[in-house]
Image: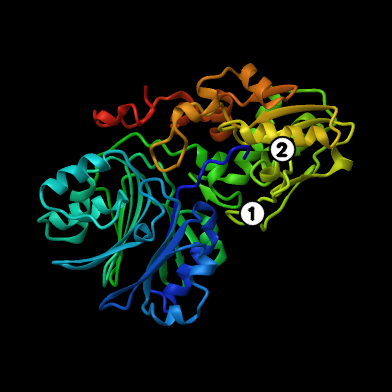
């Protein structure tokens, strides 16, 4: 991605497996692309909950095998996090675990609540004391206040108050509960492993532990898993499902199947459609690795222009690095990507990526490609211009930071110094996602492109902060 949008979060849970914490660790490892700031696991032995949560990558946080001896039990839930609401302070690591009058409960959340601040203000006026700044904690306080008898009714009562995107996993001493919001913004998958039920954000987590894929959890569905088995209900208000199209464009792993289709195939089709909409005479198609690769393959197949890996990515770059005192042009880009001169020199190059956010990184990469000897650089983006922020679980910049919100495509083309620039149309995006014969049933959320948000925001003083005006 030319300018990286930050991933949201990933959740994983398993019920009825003798190595529940180990399986959850592996599941989180597969979902690491969805959040690299912090991670955590809460496990139940049938009598009590135990947790380990910390900032860092999964492999680093759970480096010590002794940790798994401290997380005994046959059920566990886990979370990888990038902070969409709340800071990156360690106190905001998930799953959040609390003790209250009815026992212990833990929750892991992928998404973002658009009325969290409104509810938090109300709850604080009623005496609630918050220990984190994460919007997820609002759900815990609402759940603790409800007078309903059963766990499913208490969770439903709490969720009827919140609005926004949530794929949730709850864990008590004896039960695991999975819930997906009525709009179905974020994916949530159900599987099975040797009699144990598994819930995860993506199917790639099932693949690693060799679990069987059963189905997707439906928008608005709640699944309760306990010693009696699995029970499904739909206690929430019905809404028009509007899953996030950016899951296909960028966030989900290419080897996952979400919203009924394999991500890799959809991204290739984006590239094919892009070639139909914006053909160009060129010598080579080069992706921005890794996110631009499937679309670049599709573009090359459709156009007949050879596909080459003209940029090589360094996969071992940490989150920070020390710049040398002597200035190196475009150091931040060059440490991550390096051009293959033999592929690029003297060529008319089509550069494929999934999006442009601010445009600054795109400008540096194009200059680097020209420095490697490219004769022409034609940029093709396998999504429409990202002009509006997302408030449903993706950490997008404010609208003023999004280059396409205030600049025309030709102005962006001049700024990033490409010879030509083409974005996939919204119509082409939906056609490639659903197929032309299914466009009437293609109800994906495309708010980041068109500004039409499926859920209206509360009328608070932060409307300007939300970037709506």
Camera-near label (2 vs 1) is: 1
Position of 380 with respect to 19 (left or right) is right
Q: In this view, does 466 lie above or below 74?
A: above
**Coordinates of residue 386 in the picture (x, y in percent):** 52, 29
Q: Do we see residue 339 in this rendering?
A: yes
The number of discs equals 2
Classify residue 231 by image quadrant: bottom left
Q: In this view, does 368 lie above or below 50?
A: above
The reply to whether discs 2 and 1 touch (Cβ–Cβ < 8 Å) is no
Q: Is mark 2 on a helix, strand or loop?
A: helix
Position of 13 with respect to 291 (left or right) is left
Q: Residue placed at 33% from the left, 45% from the top?
A: 181
**Distance (Cα) linking label 2 and label 1:** 32 Å
Pick the residue in front: 430 or 405: 405
- Mark 1 Cα shell of 10 Å, populated few (<14), some (14-19), many (≥20): few
Pick the residue in front: 168 or 235: 168
Q: Residue placed at 61% from the left, 57% from the top?
A: 318
Residue pushed farthest front? Answer: 325
The residue that disc 1 covers is 322
Pick the residue in front: 365 or 213: 365
**Coordinates of residue 445 in the picture (x, y in percent):** 43, 33
Classify residue 207 by image quadrant: bottom right
Q: Residue placed at 42% from the left, 73% from the top?
A: 20
Task: Pick the quarter of the image with the C terminus.
Answer: top left
- The label on residue 296 is 2
Does label 2 or label 1 sit earlier along the sequence? 2
């Amino acid at each position: 991605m030319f300018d990286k949008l930050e991933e949201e979060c990933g959740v994983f849970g398993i019920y009825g497996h003798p190595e529940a914490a180990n399986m959850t660790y592996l599941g989180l490892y597969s979902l690491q692309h969805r959040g690299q700031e912090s991670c955590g696991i809460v496990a139940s032995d049938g009598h009590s909950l135990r947790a380990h949560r910390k900032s860092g990558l999964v492999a680093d946080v759970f480096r010590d095998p002794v940790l798994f001896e401290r997380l005994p039990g046959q059920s566990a839930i886990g979370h990888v996090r990038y902070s969409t609401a709340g800071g990156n302070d360690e106190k905001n690591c998930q799953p959040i675990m609390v003790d209250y009058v009815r026992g212990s409960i833990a929750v892991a959340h992928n998404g973002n609540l658009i009325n969290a601040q409104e509810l938090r203000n109300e709850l604080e006026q009623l005496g609630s004391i918050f220990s984190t700044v994460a919007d997820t904690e609002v759900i815990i306080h609402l759940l603790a206040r409800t007078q309903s008898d059963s766990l499913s009714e208490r969770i439903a009562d709490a969720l009827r108050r919140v609005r926004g995107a949530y794929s949730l996993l709850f864990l008590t001493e004896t039960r695991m509960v999975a819930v997906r919001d009525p709009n179905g913004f974020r994916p949530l998958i159900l599987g099975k492993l040797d009699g144990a039920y598994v819930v995860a954000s993506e199917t790639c987590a099932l693949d690693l532990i060799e679990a069987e894929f059963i189905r997707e959890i439906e928008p608005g569905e709640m699944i309760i898993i306990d010693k009696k088995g699995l029970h499904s209900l739909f206690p929430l208000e019905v809404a028009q499902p509007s899953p996030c199209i950016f899951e296909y464009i960028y966030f989900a792993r290419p080897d996952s199947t979400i919203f009924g289709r394999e991500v890799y195939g959809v991204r290739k089709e984006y590239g094919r459609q892009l070639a139909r909409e914006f053909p160009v005479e060129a010598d080579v198609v080069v992706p921005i690795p890794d996110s631009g690769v499937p679309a670049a393959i599709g573009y090359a197949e459709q156009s007949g222009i050879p596909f080459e890996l003209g940029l090589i990515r360094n996969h071992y770059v940490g989150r920070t690095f020390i710049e040398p005192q002597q200035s190196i042009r475009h150091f931040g880009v060059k440490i991550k990507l390096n051009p293959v001169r033999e592929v690029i020199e003297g060529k008319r190059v089509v550069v494929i990526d999934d999006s442009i956010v601010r445009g600054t990184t795109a400008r540096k990469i194009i200059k680097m490609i020209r420095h490697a000897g490219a004769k022409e650089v034609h940029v093709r983006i396998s999504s429409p211009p990202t002009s509006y922020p997302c408030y449903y679980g993706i950490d997008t910049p404010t609208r003023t930071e999004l280059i396409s919100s205030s600049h025309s495509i030709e102005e962006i083309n001049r700024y990033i110094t490409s010879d030509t620039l083409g974005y996939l149309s919204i119509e082409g995006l939906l056609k490639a996602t659903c197929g032309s014969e299914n466009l009437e049933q293609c109800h994906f959320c495309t708010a980041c492109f068109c500004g039409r948000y499926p859920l209206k925001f509360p009328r608070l003083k932060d409307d300007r902060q939300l970037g709506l005006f």
